[in-house]
């Protein structure tokens, strides 16, 4: 399995990266399958640098804030009006209301919205996409939100999405080969509850859960990511790095 960081900026696109978008690829012996985990604003353009956007098999949406879903609007246009013709529907898994949220985002009637382009499905348990098994885990955030465990070929990536500290973070990180975790907050600020994690929160969860590698993501442009990295190092002594747009991880 390969992970590519398409975008990793927190809350909005930053000067060096689009907002959250992660490409996972795995072979099933016949072909390479590709899923996108989140599709934040600014990420569709960057995706072209890595793969043909029409080669994506499914989109997995952790929650419906703009920095995690809004480039589905551009993807709708690409799939509907591509010069080779309208493209087949692909599944989009997300929280309840994803289809309606995306229709409103592009000022479409709720019926049909984007349903001719996307097969919208709600998170309600594990799903299978080619070689990938995806397990959603509800997490603490102001809107319905899910962490995701994505497994293929005996390997697992755990992704927090956006979440405040909660037991579910440990569940997402349990024994994963790579823990892709948001670190939007720093400990020197009086942070609101049930919203985001600090580097210390991530490191502590990774240690408790036995995560074998940690990659910090979703650091907002107003914070220095090196501070988040240093905080995480105080609580986790395994392999630890910052997500960078364009970086790849071969598991």
Image: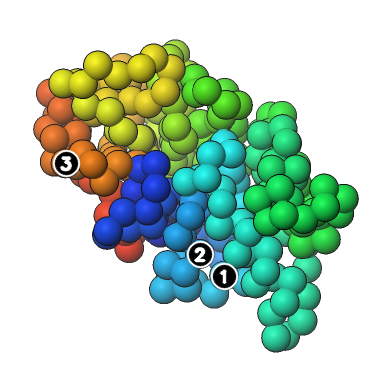
Q: Which mark is residue 53?
A: 1
Query: How far, Cα to Cα, is label 3 from label 1?
Result: 31 Å
Q: In which quarter of the image is residue 229?
A: top left
- Name which residue lies at 46% across and 60% down: 43
Q: Position of residue 199 (x, y in %)?
A: 23, 28
Q: In this image, 127 relative to 245: left or right?
A: right
Please, is residue 56 above or below residue 110 in the view? below
Tell me if residue 196 comes above or below residue 213 in the rendering.
above
C-alpha span from label 2 to label 1 = 8 Å
Q: Earlier in the sequence, mark 3 or mark 1?
A: 1
Viewer-nearest residue: 52 or 8:
8
The quarter of the picture where the N terminus appears is bottom left
User: In x, y percent, where is residue 112?
Assistant: 86, 54
Neighbours of disc 3 within 10 Å: few (<14), some (14-19), many (20+): few
- Label whose residue precedes the other's in the sequence (2 or 1): 2
The answer, for residue 153, to whether it is visible in the render is no
Question: What label sits on residue 224 in the rendered view?
Answer: 3
In front: 182, or 106? 106
- Between disc 2 and disc 1, the foreground one is 2
Cβ atoms at labels 2 and 1 below 8 Å apart: yes
Q: Name the residue under label 2.
A: 44
Residue shown at 24%/16% (left/top)? 190
Q: Relative to 240, is 96 on the left or the right?
A: right
- Relative to 158, is 5 above or below? below
SS state under label 1: helix
In the image, which is nearer the foreground, mark 3 or mark 1? 3
């Amino acid at each position: 399995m390969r992970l590519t960081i398409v975008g990793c900026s927190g809350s909005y696109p930053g000067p060096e990266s689009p907002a959250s978008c992660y490409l996972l690829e795995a072979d099933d012996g016949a072909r390479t399958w590709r899923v996108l985990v989140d599709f934040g604003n600014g990420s569709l353009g960057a995706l072209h640098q890595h793969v043909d956007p029409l080669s994506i098999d499914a989109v997995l949406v952790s929650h419906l804030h703009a920095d995690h879903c809004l480039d589905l609007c551009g993807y709708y246009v690409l799939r509907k009006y591509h010069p080779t013709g309208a493209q087949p529907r692909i599944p989009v898994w997300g929280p309840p209301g994803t289809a309606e949220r995306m229709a409103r985002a592009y000022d479409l009637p709720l019926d049909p919205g984007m349903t001719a382009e996307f097969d919208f499905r709600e998170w309600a348990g594990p799903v299978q996409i080619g070689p990938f098994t995806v397990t959603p885990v509800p997490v603490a955030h102001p809107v319905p939100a899910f962490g995701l465990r994505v497994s293929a070929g005996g390997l697992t990536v755990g992704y927090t999405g956006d979440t405040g500290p909660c037991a579910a973070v440990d569940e997402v990180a349990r024994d994963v080969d790579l823990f892709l975790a948001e670190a939007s907050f720093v400990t020197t600020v009086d942070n609101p509850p049930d919203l985001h994690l600090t580097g210390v929160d991530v490191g502590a969860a990774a240690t408790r859960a036995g995560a074998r590698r940690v990659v910090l993501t979703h650091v907002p442009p107003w914070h220095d990511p090196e501070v988040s990295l240093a905080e995480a190092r105080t609580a986790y002594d395994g392999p630890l790095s910052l997500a960078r747009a364009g970086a790849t991880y071969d598991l």
